[in-house]
Amino acid sequence: MSAFVLYVAGFVVLLGGLIYGAFLLHVPHAWIGVGALVIIGFGIMSAVSHTKQRDPPSEPPRG
């Protein structure tokens, strides 16, 4: 399993917990949806930035 999939799976679990907590606190459904969208966007951006392939170092200049 790739690091990206594990990262996204962790965010899905986090999102589920936050949505359930907001539901128990009687937060209006519209605000739960807005919060979920924001967290999904943040999760995707974070997962991509943490799991992207790094460029290999270039050769040092010969001199």
Image (cartoon, helix red, strand yellow):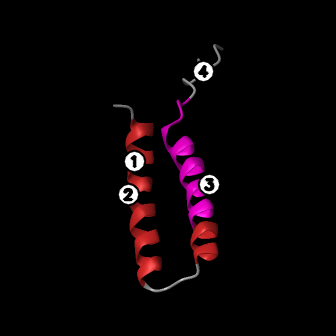
Residue 37 point in image, percent of width and height:
62, 60
Circle 3 — which element? helix
Q: Nearer the viewer, mark 3 or mark 4?
A: 3
- Are discs 1 and 2 less than 8 Å apart at CB? yes
Q: Nearer the viewer, mark 4 or mark 2?
A: 2
- Residue topped by disc 1: 9
Q: Nearer the viewer, residue 35 or 46?
A: 35
Disc 1 residue type (three-letter): Ala
- Residue topped by disc 4: 58
Reading the chain from its start, which is encountered first: label 4 or label 2? 2
- Residue topped by disc 2: 13
In terms of secondary structure, what is the magenta stretch mainly? helix
Q: Residue furthest top?
A: 62
Reading the chain from its start, which is encountered first: label 3 or label 4? 3
Per the rendered image, the range of residues in magenta is 36-54
- Residue topped by disc 3: 41
